[in-house]
Amino acid sequence: MRKNDIFEIEITGMTDDGRGVGRINGMAVFVPYVIVGETARIVLIKITKTYAVGKLIEVIKPSTYRVRPECSAFYKCGGCALMHMSYEKELEFKRNKVKDCIERIGGFKNFEPSDIVPSPKTERYRNKSQFPVTLEGIGMFAAHSHRLVESDDCLIAGENCRAVIKAVKYWMKSRGISAYDEQSGRGLVRHVCVRQADSGTLVTIVTSKDELPGSDALVDELKSSCPDLSGIIQNINTKKTNVILGSENKTIYGSSYLIDNIGHVKFRISPMSFYQVNRAQTERLYSIAEEFADLKGHETLLDLYCGIGTIGQFMARGAKKIIGVEYTPQAVMDARENAQINNVKNAEYYCGKAELVIRDIIKKGVRPDIAVLDPPRKGCDIKLLNALSEIPTLKKIVYISCKPSTLARDMKILNNLGYIPKKAVPVDMFPGTPHVETVVLMSRNM
C-alpha cells in the first residue's frame, strides 16, 4: 500500500466523526462521505503504521440510505459530514454512537439509550454561525484545515446569514477594508459572527485592531440588508491565535445583546455567551433534564457550568433554590440579569471553577439534592466529580453532554463513586453533522 494507490473498498463501520471504515490488506482505512454497506473506489492520501486515510473517487455500490446533498459546498466544506445520508440513517448513526461509547468506554454493557429525539428542522436551524474572513473571501474552512471554501450561504445557518455575508463583502470591497491573513498577521477583518433570536439579529465583526474605518457605511449596509438587525458589535482580537473572539467588545450600532425565549423563560445573550444553537431542540433537551430532575419544590439544585443560567432558570419554578456556578465572568453577569428578567428570586450565581466553588458552598452548610452538569466537550474535571460524590445529600446527577466519549468516561467515574445510570436520551441538536447531545440521569446507590 502506497500513497496515491487506488482501491475498491467495502465500508463496514463508521467512526465517531462520521467517516466510513473499511479494510485493505487487513489495515483500517478511513473514508469520508460513505455509508456502511457501500462499495467505493478510493485513492489513498495518507498511510501510517496502523491505519490509512482514503479520498472518495466514486461510490460503486451505493446504500439505499444515500441521498443527494442539498448544499452545493458539502463535499468541500468542513462544517457538515452527514448530508449524503438520509436523516433516518443519520439518527441511527448518532444513537448507535451514544450506545457504543456508553458500552465501550463507560463499561455499561446492558444499558440502552432511548430513541433519539429528532430535530423538527434539518436546515436553517442554527441561531449562531461564525464565518472566517481570509484573503480568499468569506465562507467556511475545509475539513481539518484553514483552507477557505468561499460561500455566500450555509444551509444550516440562520435565514439572515446570506444577507449579512453579502453586505459585509460589499462593504469591504467598496471601502477597501482588508481581510486578515493568518500567516503574516496583517489585515483587519477576521470573522463575521451572526446570532439570531426573538429580538432580532446581532452581527459581530471580529477585527485584529481597535480601529474600524468605514463603520458608518457598514451600519448602513447591514441595516438595509437585514431588516431585523438588533445590533452590531466590533470584537477586537489582536492575538495571533485560532481562537475566534477576543476579550474586548465595542457596540457600534443598536443593542449589545439579544433576548430569546425558551418555553416559559427568556434570556439575555451577549456575544461572548454560550447558548445552544438549535432553539427548538434546546427546549426539548431542557424538558428532558427537568423530567429527570423530577423536582418537588423543596430541593436545592446545583446548576454547574451554568453559562447564562438557562437550565437552572428553566427549572427554577420547581426548586426551592438554584445555585449556579460558571467560570466566565460575562456569563455570570448575564445569568444574574436573566434571573431579574424572569423574576427568578430563588437563584444565586458564583463565578469560578466549579470544583472549588462547590467545596466553599458545602463548607457554608449548603446541602444540595440534585446537580445538573452541562460541561464543555472535554467533560468534567475529576476533582468536581469527586467533590460531588462527597455531598451526602446529593441523590441525583443530570448530565447533559455534547460529546458521547467524555460523557461515557465521566459516567464510569461517577459509577465508581456510587452513582448508577438510570436513563439516557440522545437529542439531535446538530442535523447534518456527526455531533449529538445526550441527557443522562444518574442516581446515588443508596
Image (cartoon, rainbow, N blue to C red):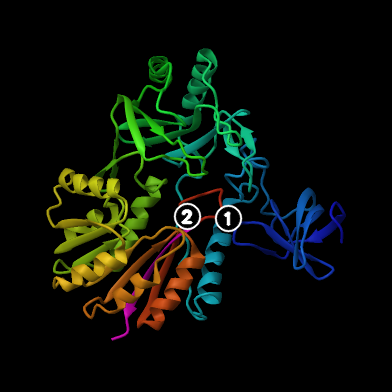
For the N terminus, the image quarter is bottom right
Between 247 and 309, which is closer to the camera in this rendering? 247
Please state the horizontal and vertical placement of residue 303, each as a whole percent of the image: 27, 61
Label 1 Cα neighbours within 10 Å, binned few <14 / some 14-19 / many ≥20 = many
Q: Which residue is mark 1?
A: 90
- For badge 2, the amino acid type reads Asp
Quadrant of the image occupied by residue 363: bottom left
Determine if the magenta segment contains residue 442: yes
- Secondary structure beneath dot 1 equals helix
- Pick the residue in front: 392 or 364: 364
Q: Foreground: 416 or 286?
A: 416
Q: Residue furthest bottom?
A: 446
Q: Earlier in the sequence, mark 1 or mark 2?
A: 1
Q: Is residue 232 above or below residue 262?
A: above
Q: Which residues are magenta?
A: 436-446
* Residue 86: in magenta span: no
Q: Position of residue 18 (x, y in %)?
A: 62, 56
Q: Residue at x 42, y 45 (%)?
A: 277
Dot 2 alpha-carbon crowd within 10 angstroms: few under 14, some 14 to 19, many 20 or more = many
Quarter of the C terminus within the rendering: bottom left
Residue drawn 46% across and 61% down?
A: 378
> Residue at the spot x=38%, y=62% of the render?
400
Using residue 177 as the reference point, say whether residue 3 is left or right of it. Answer: right
Quarter-wise, where is residue 386 in the image?
A: bottom left
Q: Which residue is mark 2?
A: 428
